[in-house]
Image (cartoon, rainbow, N blue to C red):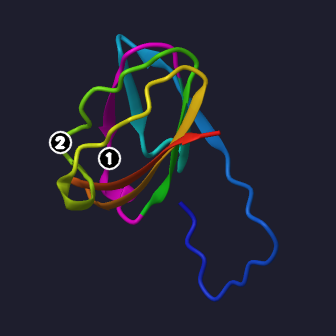
Amino acid sequence: MAVLQATTLSGSLFRTSDTVTITNSTASVDFSDSDNFIINAGGDFSFDWTVTGSNVGQSGTIIINNTADSTIGSLPSITKTPDGAAILFVTSSATTSVLSYYIAATDKVLVSYIGNFA
C-alpha cells in the first residue's frame, strides 16, 4: 500500500473492479483484493467478507448484476445497515444494484444499498 504525503493528484483516478465468482452459493469478497467488485448472480447466494486491519478506512462498491432471478441470503454478521434494517434486495433477472461499503473496523462493515437501476 502506498501512502502519499503532500501530493496533489489531478485528473481522474482509474479504479479497477474484481469479478467475484459465486462458488457453492457463496460470493466471497476479500477486501484486500480490490475496492470495487462485480458479482454476476445467476441464482441464489450469500455473501462472505474477508476483512483485515489494513482494510480499515477502505470504501468502495459491489455491483450486483442479476443474470437470472437471484435471492441473496443474509449478510455476514459484521455488516451494519442504517438502523440495522434488513436489505430488501431486488431479485429479478436482468437487474443491476449497488451495495456501497465503508470498513469502519475489522468487525464493522457499513453498507447502503440502491437497487434496480434501469
Labels 1, 2: front one: 2
Q: Amino acid at mark 1?
A: Val
Report helix, strand or loop for mark 1. Answer: loop
Residue for point 30% across, 42% down: 87
Query: Is residue 111 toward the left or the right of residue 43 in the image?
Result: left
Tally the marks: 2
Residue 22 lies in quadrant: top left
- Picture coordinates of residue 36 (x, y %)? 56, 46
N-terminal-most mark, 1 or 2: 1
Mark 1 surroundings within 10 Å by alpha-carbon count, few (fewer than 14), some (14 through 19), many (20 or more): some
3 in relation to 27, above or below? below
Mark 2 surroundings within 10 Å by alpha-carbon count, few (fewer than 14), some (14 through 19), many (20 or more): few
Query: Is residue 57 toward the left or the right of residue 62 in the image?
Result: left
Residue 45 lies in quadrant: top left
Residue 13 lies in quadrant: bottom right
Q: Within the magenta stretch, is there residue 48?
A: yes
Quadrant where the C terminus is found in the figure? top right
Residue for point 44% across, 13% down: 43
The circle on residue 77 is 2
Query: Is residue 110 toward the left or the right of residue 100 in the image?
Result: left
For the residues labelled 1 and 2, the Cα–Cα distance comes to: 12 Å
Q: Which residues are magenta?
A: 41-57
Residue for point 59% across, 83% down: 5
| Residues at discs 1 and 2 in contact (Cβ within 8 Å) | no
- Picture coordinates of residue 53 (x, y %)? 30, 57
63 in relation to 92, above or below? below
**Residue indicated by mark 1:** 51
Residue for point 33% across, 38% down: 88
Report helix, strand or loop for mark 2. Answer: loop
Q: Amino acid at mark 2?
A: Ser
- Picture coordinates of residue 58 (x, y %)? 44, 60
- Picture coordinates of residue 33 (x, y %)? 50, 41
